[in-house]
């Protein structure tokens, strides 16, 4: 991260050591046993408030372990001190065995005093003892979940730098930078071939955020596959999709990937997580569309594909306006109500995202003649008007 500012003033280390001394804490705990408090001298200290009974705390620990080990490998003299919210020593011990850092020995009264001193009102809470540290209210936990070790030194300035990098990536969308990660500049196909990211240059790209375990994703994958295959036939090799998996494990990812005709970001690549953050993906399925010029066309590609399929290509605003205009014109040419020989009631012209025609039994969308009395839909092409002569 050359050129980025890592300056932070860690001024409170002596204060925490004085607090420990005033509280009679002579040693801290490590996975190997007791450690003198003096071992913390000269280190960057962060306090971690958590509890074994707290599910979000347990879920966060692997992320924090990754951060801790990464920073120490970089030569950063960081120490984390666990302060427990657990109600009993068994819970404390169970929780601590998953941590490679230090802990204040179990003492409910002592822990409560430290919790009050640092005004901790939620867990997990991570408190860097520096003058410009991101506060609990500013969600340092979320910052670490988003950026991992890159969040160091946990200052507001660093957080703003990281957000600025995300904005630049989102707005400029250089594919090599967006999809590559630390020397990994390839994607993988359903049969595990490595495909260089550079081969996507000049194409319209769909970033498909989805998971095998999600029924809505499975349903949308069918629609997306149909549009993808049609575009391959009609337009050639001008459109590519990249799966950004939110599968729960590698096995699910492999099953998901092997069922799709497009490419995927490798499961072990952190780029999957980064892209969800960069494009602010809150739910799945989601489809972000990037044009041949590398600019984001839309973050709501799912609606385009669900509504118009391959006809939505190249997914620009002008193309969608043309489709909507054609749809309106089609509706204006249809009667507002009809009588059909196959149905006893009067049918009214209606608009539906999707329906099954009760005559041909095929799926339709948009214009339909529907019955207000019963659940009946008729595709306009299946209409047989009643002859009143």
Image (tube, rainbow, N blue to C red):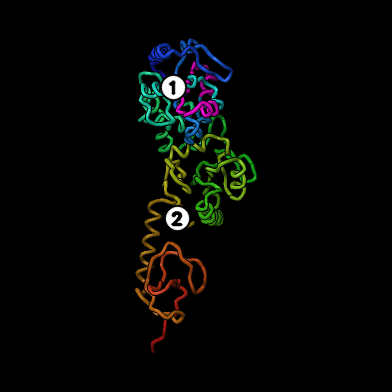
- What residue is drawn where x is 51% and y is 19%? 102
For marks 1 and 2, give the CA distance.
52 Å
Which mark is in front, 1 or 2?
A: 1
Q: Give the number of marks.
A: 2
Say whether residue 238 is visible. Answer: no
Q: Residue 95: x and y, percent?
A: 53, 28
Q: Quadrant of residue 267?
A: top right
SS category of the residue bearing label 1: strand
Q: Residues within 10 Å of mark 1 (few under 14, many from 20)?
A: many
- What residue is drawn where x is 38% and y is 58%? 322
SS category of the residue bearing label 2: helix
Say whether residue 40 is visible. Answer: yes
- What residue is drawn where x is 49% and y is 28%? 88
Q: Residue 352: x and y, percent?
A: 41, 64
Q: Quadrant of residue 348?
A: bottom left
Query: Is residue 249 depicted above or below 91 in this figure?
Result: below
In the image: residue 137, left or right of residue 190: left
Q: Are marks 1 and 2 in contact (CB under 8 Å)?
A: no
Q: Report the magenta residues as a range.
A: 68-95
- Whether the magenta-drawn stretch holds residue 153 is answered as no
In the image: residue 188, left or right of residue 363: right
- Whether the magenta-drawn stretch holds residue 88 is answered as yes
Query: Is residue 71 depicted above or below 317 in this figure?
Result: above
Q: Residues within 10 Å of mark 2 (few under 14, many from 20)?
A: many
Circle nearer the N terminus (1, 2): 1
Identify the mark at residue 210; answer none if there is no mark: none
Identify the mark at residue 312; answer none if there is no mark: 2
Q: Residue 149: x and y, percent?
A: 48, 26
Check disc 1 and report the residue beneath it: 47
């Amino acid at each position: 991260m050359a050129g980025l500012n890592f300056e932070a003033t860690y001024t409170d280390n002596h204060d925490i050591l004085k607090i420990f001394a005033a509280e009679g804490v002579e040693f801290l705990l490590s996975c190997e046993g007791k450690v003198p408090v003096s071992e913390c001298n000269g280190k960057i200290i962060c306090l971690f408030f958590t509890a074994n009974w707290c599910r979000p705390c347990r879920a966060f620990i692997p992320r924090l372990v990754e951060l801790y080990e990464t920073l120490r490998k970089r030569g950063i003299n960081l120490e984390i001190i666990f302060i427990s919210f657990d109600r009993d020593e068994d819970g404390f011990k169970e929780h601590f065995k998953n941590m490679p850092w230090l802990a204040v020995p179990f003492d409910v009264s002592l822990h409560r005093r430290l919790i009050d001193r640092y005004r901790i009102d939620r867990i997990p809470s991570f408190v860097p003892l520096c003058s410009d540290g991101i506060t609990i209210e500013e969600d340092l936990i979320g910052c670490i979940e988003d950026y991992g070790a890159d969040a160091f030194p946990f200052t507001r300035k660093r957080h703003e730098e990281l957000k600025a990098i995300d904005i630049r990536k989102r707005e400029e969308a250089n594919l090599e930078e967006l999809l590559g990660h630390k020397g990994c500049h390839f994607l993988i196909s359903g049969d595990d071939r490595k495909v260089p990211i550079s081969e996507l240059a000049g194409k319209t790209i769909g970033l498909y955020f989805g998971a095998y375990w999600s029924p809505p994703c499975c349903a949308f994958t069918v629609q997306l596959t149909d549009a993808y295959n049609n575009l391959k036939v009609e337009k050639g090799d001008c459109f590519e999709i990249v799966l950004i998996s939110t599968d729960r494990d590698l096995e699910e990812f492999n099953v998901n990937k092997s069922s799709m005709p497009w490419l995927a970001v490798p499961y072990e690549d952190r780029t999957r997580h980064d892209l969800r953050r960069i494009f602010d993906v809150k739910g799945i399925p989601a489809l972000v569309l990037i044009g041949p010029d590398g600019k984001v066309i839309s973050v709501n590609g799912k609606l385009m594909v669900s509504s118009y399929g391959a006809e939505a290509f190249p997914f620009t605003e002008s193309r969608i306006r043309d489709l909507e205009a054609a749809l309106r014109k089609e509706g204006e040419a249809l009667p507002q109500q009809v009588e059909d020989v196959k149905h006893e009631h009067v049918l009214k012209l209606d608009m539906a995202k999707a329906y099954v025609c009760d005559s041909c039994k095929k799926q339709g969308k948009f214009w339909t003649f529907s019955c207000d009395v019963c659940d009946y839909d008729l595709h306009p092409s299946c209409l047989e008007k009643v002859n009143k002569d």
